[in-house]
Amino acid sequence: MPTVPAIYKQLCPAKANLFLHIKGKRADGYHILESLVTFADFGDELTFEPGVANEPGAKDLSLDIDGQYATELAKFALGDNLIIRAAKAFEHRFELKVCGKFNLQKNLPLASGIGGGSANAAMAIKLLKQAYDQHGDVDEMLLALGADVPVCYGAENSLMTGIGERLEKWRNLPKLNAILVNPNEAVSTAKIFGRLNASAQLDDYEFVGKDAPTFKTAQDLVGFLQLQTNDMQAAAVAICPAIGNVLAELNAINDIMLSRMSGSGATCFGLFTNQSEAELAARKLANRHPNWWIQPTTFSG
């Protein structure tokens, strides 16, 4: 147990799938993926304040939620929240009792393809390891919490393969100036996979990232990304046409280098040569679409 009062803090950064290839489907129903994942300098913010079990008035475990998307998240049962599920998994893994208070500043849209819930779970585990001074392996626990949780735990530029359990660090990727855009519509990943299975032939080619290339500039990296795809994008647009509207708006920007959907959507990203262009594009889009969620950021992992 912690011996002195402390508050542990972590940023839960938004993740972006710079490309996402569906390679096949296993017998157990899980899809085999290949994705280059990076992380933004913006995200949810999570704190944990340990308590002392059996203290008068002490709660075993609580979660307070603030921020732009707090009301949306509060509609779900507490036991379904990935932070609470992560804490329970941590208790089971390390055979201890977690007591204390989480506070989540929920800045990222829900079910949006940028790993908000996965990052929350990953950073909850990281905070608990710090608070309870535990150093044991958590890889199996992370994957059990969700396919994106392992990569969000590391929060580094990574090539993710398998069902999310195989991670290869892609270090020294150039920084990318970007905006994240979400039409404030949640998308069901399961529905997109269902449509993909029914309408698309799964590719059977070698992993593009088998030999990690080196990129000297952001333009070099974007040139490589232009040859890749998000294989879920077409199915997602068919289910949520607003994603197509976002991509059309991004593609209409003169200075944009690349636009693409992240994950299973509905968040899309646009890449720019510098941050001033990204911020200007974000302001113009926000003026035209005040109900969209728009965030200028940088991807650096």
Image: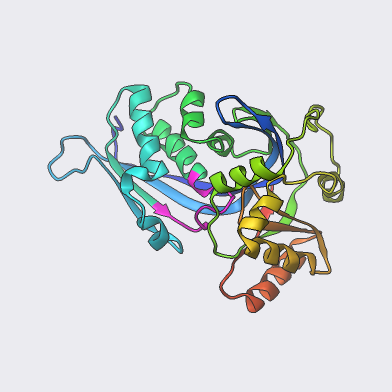
For image coordinates 86% across by 42% down, the residue present is 216
For image coordinates 53% across by 50% down, the residue present is 188
- Can I make out residue 24 in this image? yes
Asked whether 90 or 17 is in front, the reply is: 17
* Residue 124 in the image: above or below residue 246: above
- Can I make out residue 301 in this image? no
Residue 93 within the segment the image draws in magenta? no
What secondary structure prevails in the magenta region? loop
Query: Does residue 214 appear to the left or right of 300 in the view shown?
Result: right
Residue stretch rendered in magenta on the structure: 104-117
* Residue 174 in the image: above or below residue 177: above
Residue positioned most to the front? 198
Residue 38 image point, x, y percent: 67, 44
Asked whether 79 or 235 is in front, the reply is: 235
Residue positioned most to the bottom? 287
Q: In which quarter of the image is the N terminus?
A: top left
Residue positioned most to the left? 56
* Residue 13 in the image: above or below residue 182: above
For image coordinates 45% across by 23% down, the residue present is 135
Q: Quadrant of the C terminus?
A: top right
Query: Does residue 239 appear to the left or right of 220 in the view shown?
Result: left
Query: Does residue 239 appear to the left or right of 216 in the view shown?
Result: left
Asked whether 47 or 33 is in front, the reply is: 33
The picture quadrant where one finds residue 293 is bottom right
Question: How is colour applied across the structure in the image?
Answer: rainbow
Number of callouts: 0
Residue 186 image point, x, y percent: 53, 57
Residue 241 image point, x, y percent: 65, 63
